[in-house]
Image (cartoon, rainbow, N blue to C red):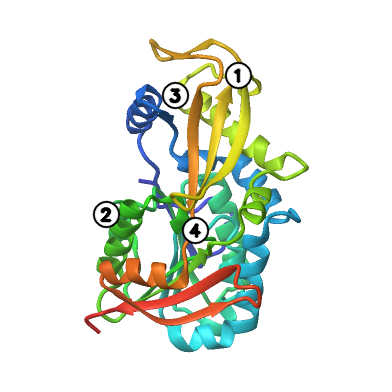
Amino acid sequence: MNSKPPSLAPANISFFDAHPAPDDCHKEILAGLQAEPKTLDPKWFYDAEGSALFEQITALPEYYPTRTEVSILKAQRDNIAAYCGQGSVLIEPGAGNCAKARLLLDAIKPAAFVPLDISADFLFSAAQEVAAAYPWLSVSALCADFRDFLSFEQHLPEGRRVLFYPGSTIGNLDPQAALNFLEQAVSLIGSDGGVLIGVDLHKATDRLEAAYNDAAGVTARFNRNILRRVNDLVGANFNPDAFQHHAFYNETLRRIEMHLISAHDQTVHISGHDIDFAAGERIHTESSYKYTVGGFADLAARAGLRRVQTWMDDECLFALHYLEPMDR
């Protein structure tokens, strides 16, 4: 566990590295690739290169979620602050470049900001920028798998907690995993805390599929980058160019699915294990579930959270919910 900030870091920042151990990464990746069908967890997208590619995706004309959520945050920041309250501990899992949190910091004025991300270099750079821009704010950056709350809860500052989970990242989890996450969130925030969460809404298939199949091919590069990341993590020998990006909307399950399709028969080596791919065989790399407002409220209720307020854009593409524990 590294708790020393890099040299020349602002005085109002601390760093903790709880990234999964190499052996844990190896076991998880190998299990996914030996499963039927083959899978890779989307958390492995986010090394420095993957995070930079995702930042490019958020600016693409086809990719509506980021700019729509940002427009809601800008338009409603004072109303959002009224619910979140000042002087709280603002915790952002999957913080990335912290841009969305920065839209709220002046309005919420939290006592502490805790960005979490699995990409250490990207996180630490973004957190230093926040600490420098807001010298009055205590910043505690945590590199961790943010779906494992027990791995970092001991490093959280004291105070009323508000979990800020934008970007519809909750959609990357299947419904049971999303329920588990929200149940953990209830435990994390306590009876007096809150959850501010962004959720992508169900909409026309063509609009959804365009967002994950951009004309510039950035999403395809992002998807294939997970193979380079796996090579770095576990010593595999994937050739990313030997796999094709494929994304489509599964209307039955109401989710976007991203896959990598093997261009030909091939064998990949991972630390003494051979993983065979037939031509056309897929690796499922990501799902992004889409919700209705009522459907998500029902999911939250099952986890012990009630929907207090919802903000949406004029086209009803995206929703930002404020949730509180039911036992408040």
* Mark closest to the chain's N terminus, 3 or 2: 2
Q: Residue at x 50, y 68 (%)?
A: 12
* Residue type, mark 2 in image: Leu
Q: Which residue is mark 4?
A: 290
* Mark closest to the chain's N terminus, 2 or 4: 2
Q: Which residue is mark 1?
A: 239
Nearer the observer, disc 4 or disc 1? 4
Q: CA distance from mark 3 to mark 4?
A: 32 Å
* Residue type, mark 4 in image: Lys
* Residue type, mark 3 in image: Val
Q: Secondary structure at mark 3?
A: helix
Q: CA distance from mark 4 to mark 1?
A: 32 Å
Nearer the observer, disc 2 or disc 1? 1
Circles 4 and 1, Cβ within 8 Å, touching? The answer is no
Q: CA distance from mark 3 to mark 1?
A: 14 Å
Q: Is residue 288 above or below residue 113?
A: above
Nearer the observer, disc 3 or disc 4? 4
Q: CA distance from mark 2 to mark 4?
A: 27 Å
* Mark closest to the chain's N terminus, 2 or 1: 2
Q: Is residue 250 above or below residue 129?
A: above
Near-viewer residue (159 or 311): 311
Circles 3 and 2, Cβ within 8 Å, touching? The answer is no
Q: Residue at x 28, y 57 (%)?
A: 180
Q: Which mark is residue 150?
A: 2
Q: Which residue is mark 3?
A: 234
- Position in image of residue 72 (x %, y %): 61, 76
